[in-house]
Image (tube, grey):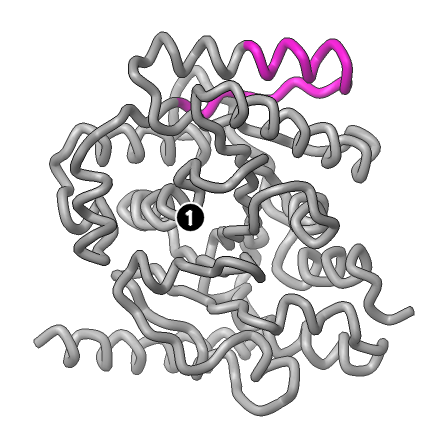
Amino acid sequence: MAIKNIRDQAMDLRRIVDSSRRPPAVRAGLRSIAVLSGKGGVGKSNLSVNLALAMAERGRRVVLLDADMGMANVDLLCGLTPGLTLAHILRGESALEDILLPLAENVWILPGGPGVRELADLDERLLSAFIDSLSALEGTADVLFIDTGAGIHKSVISFGAAADDVLLVTTPEPTSIRDAYGALKALAFSTAGKVDVTVAVNMASSFEEGQDVAERITAAASRFLGLTPRYGGAVLRDENVSLAVKKRTPLLKAFPDSEASGQVRAMAARILGLEEDHASPAPGRGIKSFFLRLARSLGAGR
């Protein structure tokens, strides 16, 4: 039954992609959200997967790009085995609909693989062809989540600079907070301070601790970087999170009624601007704009 459902979703995806090639109705552009962290081990990829599922529950169509060139593991967390990656599109060997992996209703995984690195080597003609090949995403998705690598490598910061929004994930550990601020500093320098950042605190012991961590980062960023990050909320420690990882099943699917799942849903609503006390985010700039900015930042077309 599971295999049949996956096949049905794949067929639906092909129909949606085909229909998106016709002139679309006027609608807000796809919104890109890059998920960054200063260090590894903060649960960034796990949070990305479950936020994507939570947003789909809210009626959004989400594509999650696994852009961690060193330790890509979104597929492992979801129990999926990608056969094709973004590199196959870059080389003209496959089409977008052949690469997207359905995870749940209205959620697809886009494996990055070596394709992320190869973006920097494209000339103007190939870059244009590549971006055109991804234009179908504009009609199939409302949100593009980008799970990046940890740290402040140029490729990681480039994703943050190219995206409409950045979700900065940290834990309450001092080293994690320090490295998260380091990533924020590199991002501020790369964008001349023109970046929208939301801070998410993972593995907190209490909501008070999560709030305190976010306030410390925000205070430092406001004073020294000229940035005022928003607070996206906290996900508290929950043994169900590690159990879901061991099951290779996203938390929201393995333990949908767990406290951590509820906290992820609240965070997704806040990021989407669905809370009354949180301003609604501006419309996204679209998929073509994102990949063009990313490619330029990585050095493509020079």
Q: Is residue 228 left or right of residue 186?
A: left
Where residue 128 sits, quadrant-wise, is: bottom right
The percent position of residue 73, horizontal first and vertical second, equals: 41, 59
The percent position of residue 282, horizontal first and vertical second, equals: 60, 36
Q: Is residue 291 left or right of residue 136?
A: right
Residue 12 against residue 205 in the figure, above or below? below
Label 1 sits on residue? 45
Residue 240 against residue 67 in the figure, above or below? above
Q: Is residue 217 magenta?
A: yes
Seen from the viewer's position, the closer of residues 145 and 45 is: 45
Please state which amino acid type lies under the numbered disc 1.
Ser
Residue furthest to the bottom:
93
Residue 128 against residue 242 in the figure, above or below? below
The percent position of residue 13, horizontal first and vertical second, equals: 36, 75
Residue furthest to the left:
1
At x 78% / y 59%, what residue is drawn? 298
* Residue interval drawn in magenta: 216-233
Q: Is residue 150 left or right of residue 213?
A: right
At x 60% / y 71%, what residue is drawn? 135
Seen from the viewer's position, the closer of residues 29 and 112 is: 112
Q: Secondary structure at mark 1?
A: helix
Q: Is residue 296 magenta?
A: no
The percent position of residue 28, horizontal first and vertical second, equals: 56, 50
Q: Can you say which quadrant of the picture contains the C terminus?
A: bottom right
Residue 16 against residue 198 in the figure, above or below? below
At x 27% / y 46%, what residue is drawn? 57
Mark 1 Cα within 10 Å, few/some/many (few <14, many 20+)? many
